[in-house]
Structure formats: structure tokens, C-alpha cells
Amino acid sequence: MQFSFEFGGEPQDLLITLSGSATPQDLRRMNADLISDPRYRTGLAILVDLSQLDASGFDDDGFRFATEPIAERDWEHPPLAIAILAPDQETFDAARLYAAYLGGSASGRAVFRTRVDAIAWLRDQRGNSQPEP
């Protein structure tokens, strides 16, 4: 699995893009790289783009293994909100299961099929939502 971090943006403070075939070990590696980045901090609004990710290699044990250090990261540096973009059905289902392992909606995560919806939700979480015309 490949991943990249782009800090800065609106409304997200961080864009994480994942692509290729993912394993639980890959998610742990990505998490370790993220928390070692000096730009990573508490209170970020994060957009995670899974548009090019193959998450078919995950099962319940894999999700438990992958989410343990992520839950610890969130405890030490809670994000403002994390919007997960997962357009296709298999990845969407995997992302929802991942979010459930981290506490569901109480984890500050939501899964979306479109970037427009994910961005709108992040903007709303910041309190910057614009009224509809």
C-alpha cells in the first residue's frame, strides 16, 4: 500500500491518500509515519481518500490489529474530525467497519461516497458551514 500526507487545505488540515492493496500492517506503518511527522498535532480536521485503495485483505482480526495503535493516537492527539472518502461499495463497507472498531460516530469519523459530502461534513464540524442559497 502507498500513502501520502498533505498538510494544509480547506476545510481539511490534512489529506491522507491511500492506494494499492492494503494490509493491517500497512495501516500500522502509515500510522507510525503520521505520528512521527512534526506537523501532526491535536485538533486536525482530516480527509482520508480511499478512492484508489483495495481493502479486500481485511477481516475482523485485521481490523483489530490495525486499529489498536490508531485508537492510542486518537487518545493522545484527538482529531477535530476525520472524513473518510470511500466511493466503491467494498471499500465503503470496510471503512465503516474500521470506523466502528474505533468507536463509530463517537470517534469523530464519518464515511462518505463523494468528496463533496466529505468536505461539507468537515466544514460543518469546523462550524464553518455556509447556509444554502
Image (tube, rainbow, N blue to C red):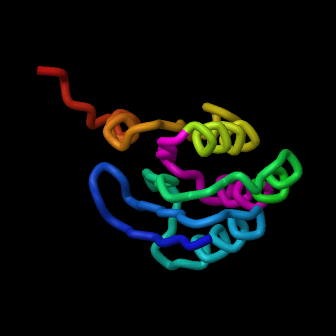
Q: Choose between 62 and 104: the one closer to the eye.
A: 62
Q: Residue furthest top?
A: 133
Q: Choose between 40 and 24: the one closer to the eye.
A: 24
Residue depicted at 35% across the width and 33% down the height: 124
**Left or right: where 50 falls relative to 118:** right
**Can see residue 80?**
yes
Q: Count the numbered circles shown.
A: 0
Residue depicted at 36% across the width and 53% down the height: 12
Q: Is residue 108 above or below residue 41?
A: above
| Residue 25, percent from left and from top | 77, 69
Q: Residue furthest right?
A: 61
Report the span colored magenta.
Answer: 68-88
Write down the quadrant of residue 7 in the picture: bottom left
Q: Is residue 38 above or below residue 21?
A: below
Q: Is residue 133 above or below residue 6?
A: above
Q: Choose between 19 and 127: the one closer to the eye.
A: 19
| Residue 53, percent from left and from top | 56, 58
**Left or right: where 113 falls relative to 29:** left
Figure quadrant of the C terminus: top left
Residue depicted at 76% across the width and 62% down the height: 24
Figure quadrant of the N terminus: bottom right
| Residue 65 among those drawn in magenta | no
Write down the quadrant of residue 92 in the picture: top right
**Can see residue 81?**
no
| Residue 118, percent from left and from top | 40, 40
